[in-house]
Image (tube, helix red, strand yellow):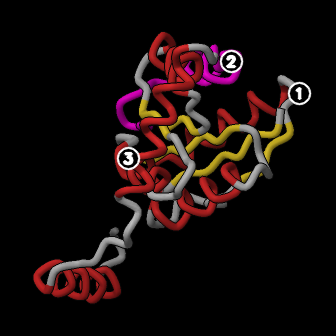
Amino acid sequence: MRIAIGSDHAGFELKERLRERLAAQGHVLHDFGPVSNEPTDYADTAAPLAEAVVDGQHQLGVVICSNGVGVSIAANKVRGARAALCGDPWSARRAREHTDCNILALGAYVTGHALAAEIVDAFVEAEFEGGRHVRRLAKLAAVEAKHSEPATLSAEQEAQSASAERSTELSPMA
């Protein structure tokens, strides 16, 4: 299977372990980075990875950050991406079988390496069941289409973002 994998700096170590495991299982992987645990922003990895999965370059994706929330939000901003943040194998399997999720999100700080491997295996091995779930996915697509206008930041959010960027430039820790 063609699988895209990526993380931010917090998920780097887990990404590397999972990448090695998936490659050993015979999957073809594309690593969206990072190449080290130097500070990176989760959206810079999760969004391009999600675009590549939605475009059909990869069958599935795995994204990782500290708690999995940031990467799942970023991936789900891509129309057609269905990223599921899963903390157990049952949820990962169910995400594929019932919701046809194409991206798995994991939290490196809250999921041990052994459990993460089980979660990834369950996600990769599961298949969409179709049937009654197709109708539900059509409803999700309608919601996505209705709310696909670009989001804009409020003036306060823009000011906070600019302030955060300035302080990040001054701080070695991010």
Above or below residue 132? Residue 61 is: below
Does residue 88 sit above or below 105 in this rendering?
above
For the residues labelled 1 and 2, the Cα–Cα distance comes to 18 Å
Q: Which residue is at a point 58% across and 23% down the rendered structure image?
A: 96
Mark 1 packing: few (<14 Cα in 10 Å), some, or many (20+)? few
Amino acid type, residue under disc 3 in the picture = Val
**The quadrant where residue 107 appears:** top left
In the rendered structure, the answer to whether residue 11 lies left or right of residue 67 reads: right
| Disc 2 residue type (three-letter) | Glu
The percent coordinates of residue 150 (x first, y second) are: 38, 72
Circle 3 residue: 143
Q: Is residue 37 above or below residue 152?
A: above
Number of other residues with Cα within 10 Å of mark 3, as a class: few under 14, some 14 to 19, many 20 or more: few
Residue carrying label 2: 127
Q: How far is disc 1 from disc 3 in space, using C-alphas?
A: 37 Å
- Residue 145: tell me if it is visible: yes
Quadrant including the C terminus: bottom left
Q: Residue furthest top?
A: 90
Residue 126, image x, y percentages: 66, 16
> What is the magenta range?
106-129
Residue depicted at x 76% and y 30%: 22
The reply to whether the magenta stretch includes residue 122 is yes
User: Can residue 69 be found in the magenta stretch?
Assistant: no
Sequence order check, earlier mark of 3 and 2: 2
Residue situated in front as seen by the camera: 3 or 139: 139
SS category of the residue bearing label 1: loop
* Of marks 1 and 2, the one in the foreground: 2
* Horizontal and vertical percent position of residue 102: 61, 37
Mark 3–mark 2 contact, CB under 8 Å? Answer: no
Residue occupying image coordinates x 14% and y 86%: 155
**Mark 1 is on which residue type?**
Gly
